[in-house]
Amino acid sequence: MNATPLVALVGNPNAGKSALFNALTGARQKLGNYPGVTVERKAGRLALADGRPVELVDLPGTYSLSPGSPDEQVTRDVVLGRQAGEKRPDALVIVVDASNLDNHLRFALELIALGLPTVVALNMVDLATRDGLELDAAILSRELGVPVVSTVAVRKRGLDHLREELGAALAGAQSAAPAQPARDFDATRSEARRIARATVVRETPSRRLTAAVDRVALHPVAGLVLLLGLLFIMFQAVYAWSEAPIAMIEGLADSAAAATRDALPDGILRSFLVDGVINGVGSVVAFLPQILILFFFILMLEATGYMVRAAFLMDSLMAKVGLSGRAFIPLLSSFACAVPGIMATRTIADPRDRLTTILIAPLMTCSARLPVYALIIGAFIPARDIGYGIGLQGFVLFCLYLAGIVGAMLVALVLRLTVTKGASGGFLMEMPKYQWPRPQDIVLGLWQRAVIFLKRAGTIIFASTMILWLLLSFPRVPDGDATSQVDHSIAGRIANGLQVVLAPVGFNRDISLALIPAMAAREVSVSALATVYSIDAGDDEAAMTQSLGDRLKRQWPFPTALAFLAWFIFAPQCISTIAVTRRETNGWKWPLFMVGYLFALAYVAAGVTYWTATAAGL
């Protein structure tokens, strides 16, 4: 042993390691990087109870000795003596969170099995007591076979006792636990839970209630049923609660359009305001209530602590298709928008896992699809119940979201077996406490979503709709010519050419036209259809008073509507998503691959849906 022993401070993230390191070393710290690795090395000096100096190194937090990132690999290599330029520690101080003992003990058991002299710091015992949990450090010490010291690092409690036990371990007065054969993951987790239960002396009813709820919420079968049930209720509410506010917004838009027609003579300016701005952009804004209802449920699930439980359940499912559990948070973010979801994949260390997650993130049903789904479902699916409190429209919306998830999992499986082939690792999650959401946080979250949506409506959607209006309005049909303005326009001629490719899947000219600006943002397909039908209506008062949904129902066959929905489950991405994919993958290869496979899936899905519905006589 060197004159100055090396002790490694190791443990899970958020266990309070850094606070304990600072408390033990004070100002006697030095920072740097490990040789050959851009990972911070934090080391310091502490004096034991007998005055002997010890070098203490604070290792990056990790959940196991199976690394998933450069930080975690450094921890593994240092503990095992494989890190270049770093000697193997003479002893370990394992820091565990007293309020989250069963999760932290799994890694502690893995470290203790290495056979190094070890002391366990049972940290943050004050927070555990505050939360109604009382632990017995002596029982934990007996179960683990190493000394356990209760500490509160931020208040410097238990540090003297920790120094004493560490000095004894280094001096050999406390013999190290013998090296144990490595257990598999499930066996170690079960042992950690058993020891954690044995260590608990007393806990409050609220903690016992939380444990009882988690036995259901985290159960592989009952938990999945609960998750699907919550999602089902959420999509039912999207329709049931939004009828009145949507009707109000549509009524305001109709009144504005009528007032504009009365105030202005027939011409380009009136067409711009009525056909482009009010009917085009207004048709998308009308779906704001449904988007806010959807995000109300998402914010509530996050604030109560349930969303992490959902992540735990989905982790098991994703592992079956070769995805890392670390992919769940980026995929969850993609339900709002694929752009932040793709950017969130930076937390995934394995390049193949990260690439797979990027490529399937667009299959998560982002909020931009909701106006499209709501329009078609509202127009073609009857607003009737199929069971007690179960609306058919909400059920169809639930099935569309579920189809996107299933499609993403299947694509991930194919990708991991082909272009991103390779092994995948799991990850561990810490469960937060259940708690009541703060109303002000929910209101603020909804306000932010509303502002984001309205800004999008006032920029991307407005600009795309105006460009489409121009292409639909020119050249003008000569006086006396019976040709439709849409067919005579530049946009109409482009759409008629594109329809040759899309006609086999049941798409007409108007759908072909709407798909072009939808590349800017999916919601633009709604405003595009509204603009097309508004211009097509001309001065037909009966047509002008019809809602967009009524016009679609009158002009589209039912199989075409179903094919349109199927298309948007896999629809090729908006320009923003393509751009961020190009940036995150450092080239055009994978963005083009993503657009190509999504277009192929969308085309096949729409075609199969159309011909199946047609053959069934729907």
Image (cartoon, rainbow, N blue to C red):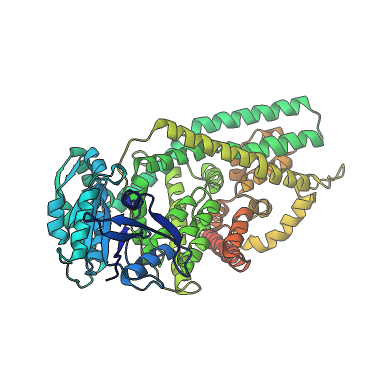
Give coordinates of residue 256: x percent, y percent: 67, 28
- Image point (49%, 33%), residue name: 243
Residue 518 position, x and y percent, is: 64, 51
100 lies above or below 326 = above
- The residue positioned 34% from the left and 52% from the top of the image is 25
Picture residue at 30% right of the left edge, 60% below the top: 54
Question: In the picture shown, does residue 61 fall above or below 85?
Answer: above
- In which quadrant of the rendered image does the N terminus lie? bottom left
Judge whether residue 216 can be spotted in this image.
Answer: no
Q: Is residue 159 left or right of residue 141?
A: right
- Using the image as rendered, state which of residue 287 and residue 322 is in the foreground: 322
Between residue 217 and residue 443, name the one nearer to us. 443
- Residue 93 coordinates in the image, percent (x, y): 26, 59
Quick one: 291 or 99, which is closer to the camera? 99
Q: Is residue 443 visible?
A: yes
> In the current view of this chain or complex, which residue is farthest to the right?
479
Task: Say if 208 sits above or below 347 in the image.
Answer: above
Question: Where is residue 439 drawn, in percent x and y?
Answer: 41, 31
